[in-house]
Image (spheres, coloured by chain):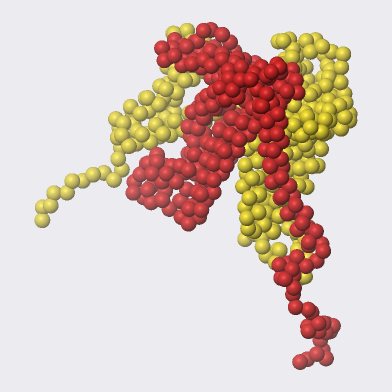
Chain colours: A yellow, B red
Amino acid sequence: MSHAVTTRPLNSARLPRWTPWLVVAGSAAAAAGIGLAAGLDSRIQWGLIAAALFVLVTYALSAKVEGPRHAKDRIATSLVWVCLLIAVIPLASLIYETVARGVKVLDGYFLSHSMGLIADSEAGGGIYHALLGTLQQVALATLIAVPIGLLTAVYLVEYGRGRLAKTVTFFVDVMTGIPSIVAGLFVLSFWILILDFGPSGFAGAMALAILMMPIVVRSTEEMLKLVPNELREASLALGVPKWRTILKVVLPTSIGGITTGVMLAVARIAGETAPVLLLVWGNPLINTNPFDGAQASLPLYIYQQYANSAGSPAAYDRAWAASLVLIAFIMILNLAARGIARWKAPKQGR
Amino acid sequence: MNSEIDTAPPPPPLQDTPPPTKAEARGATRPGDRIFLGLSRGSGILLLLIMAAIAAFLTYRASLVLTENEGNFLTTFEWDASAIPPNFGIAVLAFGTIVSSIIAMVLAVPIAVGIALFLTHYAPRKLGGPIAYVIDLLAAVPSIVYGLWGALFLVPHLTGLFSWLDEYLGWTGIFEWQGGAPRTLLTVGILLAIMILPIITNVTREVFRQAPQMHQEAALALGATRWEVIRMSVLPFGRSGIISASMLGLGRALGETMAVATVLSPSFTINASLLDPGGGTFAQNIASKFSEASVQGRDALIASGLVLFVITLLVNGLARAIIERRKEYSGANA
């Protein structure tokens, strides 16, 4: 019974677990060395060299010890990590630059004064008029978009069957992709060019509402779909009319998620510049009436400080500070929205 | 039966209820119901009307100026829209829009797929949540801030890359550099890539997450490495998702206005080299030409906006159609 059995180990040879860290350290050191020797002053180049070295060395080591299949696996892993690093770098840089350059002029004076009597190239001035304009325009847009968006979502989830509902769903999806400048051009064409109204915060709010509606519809739709059917059936079985069921049972159940969606939509449109540029025009003075006359807005203020100042450092400082305020506003909205989502989330029943 | 001890009032006689009419059978009996249904259906229809109105008004205003146009709207290399008679065409804009979007896609799609894979298959559990949150933050930053960052930070830092490209790849003709400020289509492409990264990542991540667990476990059980699992069961499943996510990103890139308007120094010429000025984009042209345009000039800008609208409509519609189709077969497979 001498049957020759070729014994193969069940576990093939693997590199020890600390290898990647060692290679990271090694390639970083080597890259720094090469960078210093070749006189490369850009840290990004150092990083790229280190990444390339890391991938190559890992592949070579792994191919020698573990075989080509595992070497490929390791390459894929390191490439995925590299992708992640590449994505994080611009965000980190953007946040850092905005905060570092923005805090220079950001103070109470900046928040409470307008640009009246101050040329774009001079120091001083502030964003009070722009903040006011943005808040009014966004509030008006929300007032227009939220009822329409909510009702459309209710229609799609509670009533919508058949071709109309399918068409609406499709076009809501397509509408999310409308470039903001096109929404601006649309309002421009009928409100300003055909009906002959002047620029106003309200005109901008209409364009912003067009951008906001599909976002509200989508998020509300998702939330309404999460409401269990048992709740609707229980209410209907008690003889409650369908519209009261929706108003008193379905909407209150999903109100947390709906609020989150609306706040995210507000955050999204608060940063829109293009429609405001076409319809509100910007104004260095305080205009408290959104229905008459040009108004300022925070994103537009940033653009105008950058574009109209011919490179004046004071204007750039104001642009960065306004960016910081805008980002802070949007991040606070985002965080609050997430907080509400978590707080109001339906508890997982067990 | 034992009606003497029943404390509840007797039920109303049933035979008095009239048989349901046709309207009642549909569920819209009470006036409140009818009003509510009318309101909600009305808002749905209003959304459709808005879409139709956008197309109609843009077409109307565009037709006013297109009949006057001296040049050929598609092939003229000039934008003299406020002159009388006007002479303008979208050739340069179409070139710039397409080239910058292609650059953005080439840079963003592989990285976005990588990040999506990281989030679904590679990330240690503690890292996945925060990273996904950071990606969402990238999406929330307004485009004007990207523009400011691009113009004041990215542009000065790109001279190194530009001279490197010129030195080693200049012979291709695409990467020749005359030494001007790096405010060209390549810069725009890089900035757009950063801006569309989050949307592509988020959509692909959702698709990868739905990849059938059984297939992956089966592959693992056969001894596949993690990369082989991804290549054999995750990527084939997610292919249409990647395509539609890329097209959603493309739609964003095509219509992006302010970031391009701040970073690009436009010129109405077409240049083979991506490092030399040449080209503009539809949206950027509208934003930068708007303030000094006459009514006729605005109509011309509206005409170019109409082209942009149609393109983005097609791209987004196609992307959504692909997603829809995938939904159907993945439902059967799950």
Percent coordinates x, y for residue A206 in the rendering? 77, 36
Figure check: B306 above or below B164: below
Residue found 61% across the figure and 17% down from its top? B78
Residue found 51% across the figure and 53% down from its top? B328
Task: From the viewer's perspective, tell me whether residue B90 is left or right of residue B235.
Answer: right
Percent coordinates x, y for residue B305 in the rendering? 65, 29
Residue found 54% across the figure and 45% down from its top? B321
Quadrant showing the N terminus of chain B: bottom right
Residue found 38% across the figure and 47% down from its top? B220
Q: Residue furthest left?
A: A1
Q: Quadrant of residue A296?
A: top right
Figure check: B333 above or below A132: below
Is B214 or B39 nearer to us in this picture? B39
Percent coordinates x, y for residue A59 in the rendering? 35, 29
Task: From the viewer's perspective, tell me whether residue B187 is left or right of residue B144.
Answer: left
Q: Quadrant of residue B57?
A: top right
Is residue B191 among what the camera can see?
no
Is B67 or A300 nearer to us in this picture? B67
Is residue B298 among what the camera can see?
yes
Percent coordinates x, y for residue B7 in the rendering? 84, 84
Figure check: A305 above or below A160: above
Tally the numbered discs.
Answer: 0
